[in-house]
Image (spheres, coloured by chain):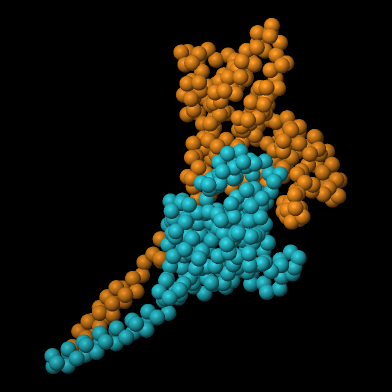
Chain colours: A orange, B cyan
Amino acid sequence: MMRGFLIFAFFTISTLLVIVLQPGPRDDFAYQQNPQALLETSRNQMQVLDEPREDTLLTIPDDVISELKAGGTDQSVQPIVAPEAADTGVILNGLQATLATPINTDAAVSDALAEATTVFQQPSVQPQASIHAIAPELRDMSWQTLNALNGIGHVSKAPGQQGSLLNSIVRRSMGHVDGTLVVSAPSSQMRVALSAPAVAINNATVWRQAARAKIAANTGLQNYTVSSGDTLALIAIKLYGSALATDQLLQDNPVLRQNPNTLRIGQQLNYRMP
Amino acid sequence: MSKIKSVKGALASAIGVVALTLLLLPQSAVADIARGLTSVEFEFGGQVFSIRRGADGDVALPNRYSQATRTCPEHCIEPATAAPGVATLSELEVFTFMQQNVSTGSGLLVDARLPAEFSGGSIPGAISVPAATLVTNNPYREDLLLALGAKGALGQMDFSGAFDLLVFDDGPWSPTARQAVQLLLDAGYPAQKILYYRGGLQMWHIFGLTVSK
């Protein structure tokens, strides 16, 4: 009798314990955020969080490093644009001070940084704010933020679209491709107007270039000169950020559409900046 | 005999039930956010986030948020409004923003701190837009504004389709969010689309609300 009572009590208590307490995975598990979310890469995004910045420093030659160390302490950070209000000026100085890296427009250092920077080669002097001239932290922060914002899906993430990360990089580095900067429509029209009087009408190639520039101003088509080592896919990646855009290239260049093997070095291709 | 058995059985079950209820009480350390509101659910970027209060149990405040002595001029006490026209929100209003704006895709939670601080933990569903990236001599500022939903070229940007931004930082002792708000306004962002959560992560931690890792 006693044993029966004990067995009954044991099973009742354990059943009720299991039902009520429900030991199992904790509630937090259901809502645990994926910590790797920011590191996910797709073809169109760059993984900047994992980039070890020390690697770029390794390629700077020693004399440049000693130069930096010598001039490091009394180099103060100067904003390129003069602040409009006193408040903004204080903010700019304060924010740039926190970046803790002097903005260096020295040609030697910028050349060294150009070597170290992975993909693009850029001229050391540019009329607008050059990518060289900003601290690598600022650039990396901007890329990280653009990465995160592109993941939201508000702005169309198609590669080469305005606002996409690769479009920004491509646009900024297009200065060397044609000799002309890729800018928005009003400035390109201005450029056409300025270059028109300088065209020598007898020179066929110059005339052709002027005609292309005029067409570009009207239809939004721009020029790309094929350089050595270029393939259609590579050009598509350079211009649009994705190899899938080759059909866009072929659409804009009917000469190529018939026979894509006629790609030659120095050939002028049309492309439409989206 | 059988009567005694059944009485003992009933007694055993009663004891069992009482013991269980006593064991149950310490388990629920989760406190209510407000009267009748235990958790706030919202969706962002394809993920569902749930904000609870005290979900981590008895965890102490991080060092960064348990300092009572901070000095001005670096960490002055921030004013109630970041800029004229920019509304300041408190926690419950932040929850409303999360459920109405962020879940529908028209709002963003913007952490204005540096990326190193952001990766140490932030409000769930927030994205990192450091205030330093919004300065005028950042060549990527235009791209950032475009990614925030603006259209057009710098100087004449159309912000009608842009996100509503809820900007926050470490807390009422950190000037970063106010600077970010002012930089956004300088870039042309409309003031009615910017909201300022003054409490920041300081108050978030004090309330024990869920922090993303």
The residue drawn where x is 54% and y is 67% is: B90
Q: Quadrant of residue A225?
A: top right
- Horizontally, residue B36 falls left or right of residue A102, namely left
Instruction: Depth check: give the residue in front, A186 or A166.
Output: A186
B18 vs B118: above or below: below
Image location (x, y in percent) of residue A124? 75, 32
Pick out the residue farthest to the left. Answer: B2
Instruction: Depth check: give the residue in front, A123 or B95.
Output: B95
A259 vs B27: above or below: above
Instruction: Depth check: give the residue in front, B72 or A220.
Output: A220
The N terminus of chain A, quarter of image = bottom left
Q: Quadrant of residue B141?
A: top right
Image location (x, y in percent) of residue A122? 70, 31
Image location (x, y in percent) of residue B54? 49, 72
B156 vs A237: above or below: below
Instruction: Depth check: give the residue in front, A35 or A16.
Output: A35
The residue drawn where x is 66% and y is 22% is: A192
| Residue A65 shows up from this direction | yes
| Residue A29 shows up from this direction | no
- Horizontally, residue B54 falls left or right of residue A4, namely right
Label count reads: 0
Image location (x, y in percent) of residue B6? 17, 89
The residue drawn where x is 27% and y is 75% is: A15
The residue drawn where x is 43% and y is 51% is: B46
